Image: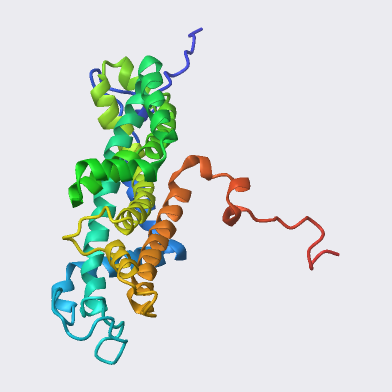
């Protein structure tokens, strides 16, 4: 009798790895595709993105689109709105439409630049704290807690008074104050990523911390970092408007906050010149609302903690009971 031995079971190709070759993390392109899909399919994100793009294009092409020069006096002080000046004139007789177009430049520059600073600082702190843990996590999170309890507006007033009134200082002030929420969000996500199977396999095969961070963790948190940065742009624009309104903005740069501050300080209210105050305020509100709409939609899609039915009303649907429908007999 000849003994029959079972055939050798072949391992799937995806379970076999070459020596010295690190396992690849999930493709980061999926996150970018999710970002584009959210903007395309969700009305709130679409409206927010369109508004941001339109305002950005107006700011970029302001010299070509503006009806008058930035410092060109075209009428009396606080001239009323007319067919030639749709939003009237300011306290210097300058067209308000022109000022709004040029003011969008400074507001957007401060918003995006300050958000980039907050993303860089907060993302770095969050990744280091979540990846290494231990004493590194404790020290970095204590520093984050200290920044969280500091009142932001009084600190901005003090720092702006010390450093001086310049656009660069305003960007640094806002960015170095509002990085804490980004750090805590990224830290929580990285703490889960470092326990994934592909990260542990790469570490077992000899991958260093630098490779693990830049190759396996950073690409996975980038979509969430982008979504949080969009929300940070809205916060930075509001902070810049508040600083300029308090008289601590750069007086040489025309921004929406500076237009509101000039109108208040130069008796626009007592002269019933509402067109010098309302349009800049509406522009700030519209841009902040657009950034909030886009950022909220992206964060709902990218943040794993928000992908739960009881936390998101839009994803919660009641299922019909069996035998209770219209076709039940």
Image height of 109 relative to 162, above or below: below
Q: In this view, does 315 lie to the left or right of 154?
A: right
Name the spot of residue 256 as percent of width and height, x first. 29, 65
Name the spot of residue 53 as percent of width and height, x first. 29, 66
Q: Residue at image x 28%, y 92%?
A: 83
Quarter holding the C terminus is: bottom right
Farthest bottom residue?
Answer: 83
Q: Residue at image x 35%, y 45%?
A: 223
Q: Which of 192 and 105 is in front in this view?
A: 105
* Quarter of the view holding residue 292: bottom left
Name the spot of residue 91 as percent of width and height, x first. 25, 76
Name the spot of residue 62 as percent of width and height, x first. 18, 72
Q: Which of 239 and 264 is in front in this view?
A: 264
Count every numbered label the image shows and give the total: 0
Q: Residue at image x 33%, y 49%?
A: 32
Q: Residue at image x 21%, y 64%?
A: 254
Q: Is residue 278 left or right of residue 206?
A: right
């Amino acid at each position: 009798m000849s003994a029959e031995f079972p055939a050798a079971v072949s391992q799937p190709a995806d379970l076999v790895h070459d020596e010295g070759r690190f396992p690849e993390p999930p493709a980061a392109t999926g996150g970018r595709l999710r970002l584009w899909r959210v903007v395309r399919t969700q009305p709130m994100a679409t409206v927010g993105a369109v508004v941001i793009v339109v305002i950005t294009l107006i700011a970029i092409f302001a010299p070509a689109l503006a009806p008058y020069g930035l410092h060109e006096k075209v009428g009396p002080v606080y001239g009323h709105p007319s067919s030639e000046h749709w939003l009237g004139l300011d306290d210097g007789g300058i067209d308000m439409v022109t000022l709004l177009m040029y003011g969008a430049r400074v507001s957007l520059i401060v918003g995006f630049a300050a958000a980039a600073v907050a993303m860089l600082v907060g993302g770095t702190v969050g990744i280091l704290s979540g990846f290494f843990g231990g004493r590194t996590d404790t020290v970095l999170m204590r520093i984050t807690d200290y920044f969280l309890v500091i009142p932001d507006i009084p600190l901005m007033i003090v720092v702006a008074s010390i450093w001086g009134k310049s656009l660069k200082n305003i960007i640094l002030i806002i960015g170095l104050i509002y990085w804490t929420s980004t750090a805590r969000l990224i830290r929580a996500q990285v703490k889960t990523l470092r326990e994934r199977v592909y990260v542990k396999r790469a570490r077992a095969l000899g991958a260093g911390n630098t490779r693990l961070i830049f190759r396996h963790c950073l690409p996975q948190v980038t979509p969430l970092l982008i979504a949080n940065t969009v929300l940070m742009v809205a916060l930075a624009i509001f902070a810049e408007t508040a600083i300029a309104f308090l008289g601590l903005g750069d007086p040489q740069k025309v921004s929406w906050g500076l237009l509101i501050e000039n109108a208040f300080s130069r008796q626009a209210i007592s002269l019933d010149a509402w067109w010098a105050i309302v349009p800049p305020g509406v522009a700030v509100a519209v841009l902040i609302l657009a950034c909030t709409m886009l950022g909220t939609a992206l964060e709902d899609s990218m943040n794993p903690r928000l992908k739960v039915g009881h936390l998101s009303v839009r994803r919660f649907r009641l299922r019909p009971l069996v035998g209770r429908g219209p076709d039940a007999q």
